[in-house]
Amino acid sequence: MIIVRYLIRETIKSQFAIFFVLFLVFLSQKFISVLADASDGDIPASLILSIVGLNMPAMGLLMLPLSIYIGILLTFGRLYAESEIVVMNATGIGNKFLIQSALYLALITASVAAFNSFWLSPWSQDKVEQMYEEVAAENSVDLLPKGKFEGTPDGSSVVFIDDIDGNKLENVFVAQMRPRDSVLPSVMFSKSGDVKELSDGRQVIVMYDGTRHEGVPTRLDYMVTHFEEYEGLIGQREVEKKGRDWEAISTLELIGNPNNSAKAELQWRISLVLCIPLLTMLVVPLSAVNPRQGRFAKIGPAILIYLTYFLAISATKSSIEEGSIPAVIGMWPINALLLFVAIGANFMDSVPVRRLKEKFKNKRLA
């Protein structure tokens, strides 16, 4: 029907605009976070864009439900404010066409969300964790930018590397300014070197054809040593074995997994898809406004409902992980409650109820 296509087209415009704004906000936040990790030396600068890009599907988990929810609210609110829906009702086009067009769009959005929630987002998070594991397996000096003074992860040394070619270092400067036990502060310089990591996580730099200045120049124990090869400990990295986060586990692996965290993650992914048609059903009657109120009249209550729902399922997810709520119960009561509220809101906005309200209103006036 033409009117349904018109409603879908107008809603899609609003949804894309809202999704784009949310995307910029989420992307900026993630970019700043990853950039901070890179500036701290936790990841190399070359991986910033890759990590940010792979985190985009995870951002979409919350952006897709919110974009269609606010998109329908603003679009239908504008149509109410401009009396277009009043004209539609006067010509015999009831609210069922509003619900029909909204659910068509919700079905499309839910399909995209299902693909993202059940496959794309776990896959991308798994790739991100692989990157972090590969970075953690590298030498700490490999993460230091060349041509810049930078501290080692444990803060015991300051390293300057003029150039890096593979695992080979050129013009290396190392300053160990923190005395440890009988080891005095020292400064070393060499024309070349390389780096290796021992099995226990110790970071060792090997320097060739260099000079080592040890101690304080004004004291008698100050010493200058010329060496052909020197190995020095520049840091200690804790060797830790870390499993995959549940967000990075595939949906097929979560199904049938007896772990409470796996069950909570699976229900979370299902709820992120299921909430789209449920919130869509609720927002249609919620978008009804008086022309004098304006299209943004219901934005406050709508956001409050959205936040209440997502805070509820987030709290339930944590409770399932802790074992406070049985996984059999899980998030299903919250989704069922949202369904009943949506059905009730649409029923209160139906033609029979409107006529009943009008009848009681006329009796009071009489």
Image (spheres, helix red, strand yellow):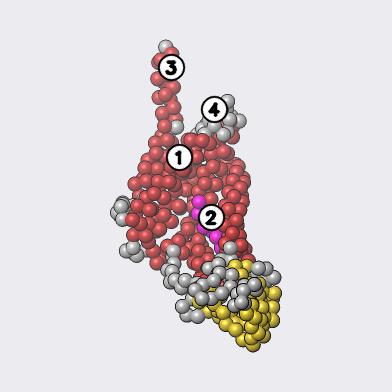
| Local secondary structure at mark 2 | helix
Residue drawn at 56 percent across, 28 percent down = 293
| Local secondary structure at mark 4 | loop
| Local secondary structure at mark 3 | helix
**Which of the image's four quarters has the C terminus?**
top left
Mark found first going from the N terminus, 2 or 1: 2
Question: In the rendered view, does 88 fall on the left or right side of 336?
Answer: right
Cα–Cα gap, marks 4 and 1: 20 Å
Quickly name the residue at label 4: 290
Which kind of residue does numbered mark 3 sit on? Asn
**Which of the image's four quarters has the N terminus?**
top right
Quickly name the residue at label 2: 59
Residue 173 placement (x, y as % from top left): 66, 75
Asked if disc 2 and disc 1 are in contact, CB closer than 8 Å, the reply is no
Which kind of residue does numbered mark 4 sit on? Asn
Mark carried by residue 32: none
Quickly name the residue at label 1: 305
Question: In the rendered view, does 359 fall on the left or right side of 108?
Answer: left
Quickly name the residue at label 3: 362
Query: What is the residue that sits farthest to the top in this orientation?
Result: 366
Residue 178 placement (x, y as % from top left): 55, 69
Mark found first going from the N terminus, 4 or 1: 4
Residue drawn at 61 percent across, 77 percent down = 220
Mark found first going from the N terminus, 3 or 4: 4
Q: Which mark is in front, 2 or 4?
A: 2
Question: In the rendered view, does 287 fall on the left or right side of 208?
Answer: left
Neighbour class for label 2 at 10 Å: few (<14), some, many (≥20)?
Answer: some
Stretch in magenta:
52-62
